[in-house]
Image (tube, rainbow, N blue to C red):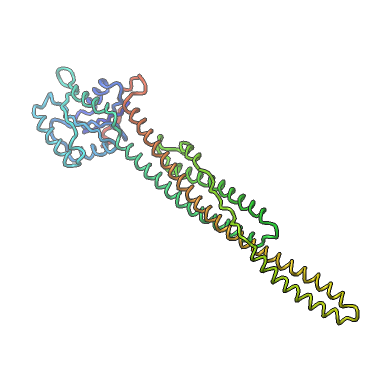
Amino acid sequence: MSVIAVVGSPSAGVSSLAAALADRLPDHTVVEASLAPDAVVVVASAVAPLADSDVDLIERAAAGTDLVIGAVSKIDAHRGWRDVQAADRALLARRDERYQKVPWVGVAAAPDLGEPDVDELVRTLVARLAKPDRLPRARQASRSMDAIAVRGGIQRARLTLTYFVRRRCAEIGADLRAEAAELPRGGVARFGDGVRDAVADFGAELDVVIDEAVDRAIGEFALTPLTLTPRTLTPARASAGPPPQLPLPRPSSRRLETRLMLVLGGGFGLGVALTLGRLTTALGPGSDLIGLVVGGVVGLLLTIWVVGIRGVLHDRALMDRWVGEVIATLRSGGEETVARRMLDAEIAFTVELRANNSELRTHNRWPRSTENHGKRRNSASESFL
């Protein structure tokens, strides 16, 4: 069912023509004025050409559609109606280029003698309304604006999410490096598990933030009945992709370093042992053996302590470098996830928009019920003027 607006000066016979069309087109709604009609019939009197005020009225009525048909009325009483029709055609064509291809017909909706003559107008309307690719310009423009707005919202969401990924990766990296700087002896395995848990938590947090951003980007511009809603983007949420593969800590050979630390630690321990031995010798006779034993034990303990401390520092430096590699991988993977999810959302929106446009064309072409909607809805043409 389509809405056909019949507009024109009251003296041109708008009411008579609207009534005649309502009887001849029972599957469509014929009105004397409409804010968003599917077709506009311009009624011009055969007495005189259109005035500028009439053209202004036509432009307001036809602002929402490209389907405009001109009709010169009262042709039964005026033989020179074709001259008036030519003048009206030229006037509209000068006002706007889209009126250059407007078809014009002559009608006699309420003749003094005989039956109404609106056959040619009816045939023209039926032929134009039956085109499968016809889409009212107002709705088409509205959809285009909605599409641009939603795509702009998706792009803004992509920028926001990219900043979020960078900020969170920096925060996670700072926390992990602080933990690595205080890594105890033998805590490498536990620290690795903590890093993997932090990465998994970030992935779950990123999925939630992306879903909320997509919902806001779509819901903010969901203005028309068939406009995309957040629920239609559900398939895009299932395409988050696998988590990034984290690099493993690089194994490093500590053989030479261990040998060096044994030599240095042994030298340090030997020096401490000799010093203690001399100190204990000064205590009295028989203290040489005691000084040698005490100095040896203390020197050995200091050697073990120096080597152990150097191992802990080595592990901390290794974990710090590993955290840097993990954060770099996490950041690139997060940005890739954002780009992929936003692309999936835009593709889903485009597919849904095409489906909605196809549905709208089908809706415009075929009536939804067999009920007679041809009863004319009267409205005051004078107030519209």
Q: For this view, does 179 lie left or right of residue 114? A: right
Task: Note whether residue 383 is visible.
Answer: no
Location of the C terminus (image quadrant):
top left
Residue 41 percent across, percent down from the top left: 23, 30
Which residue corresponds to the image point at 77% horizontal and 75% vertical from the top-left?
Answer: 272
Residue 164 vertical placement versus 95 (above, below): below
Location of the N terminus (image quadrant):
top left
Which residue corresponds to the image point at 82% horizontal and 77% vertical from the top-left?
Answer: 277
Q: Based on the displayed image, in which of its 4 quarters is residue 56 positioned?
A: top left
Q: Residue furthest right?
A: 285
Task: In this rendered view, identify the residue nearer to me: 39 or 12.
Answer: 39
Q: For this view, does 268 lie left or right of residue 94? A: right
Residue 303 percent across, percent down from the top left: 74, 69
Residue 195 percent across, percent down from the top left: 61, 53
Task: In this rendered view, identify the residue nearer to me: 202 or 10.
Answer: 202
Which residue corresponds to the image point at 85% horizontal and 78% vertical from the top-left?
Answer: 280
Residue 358 percent across, percent down from the top left: 35, 31
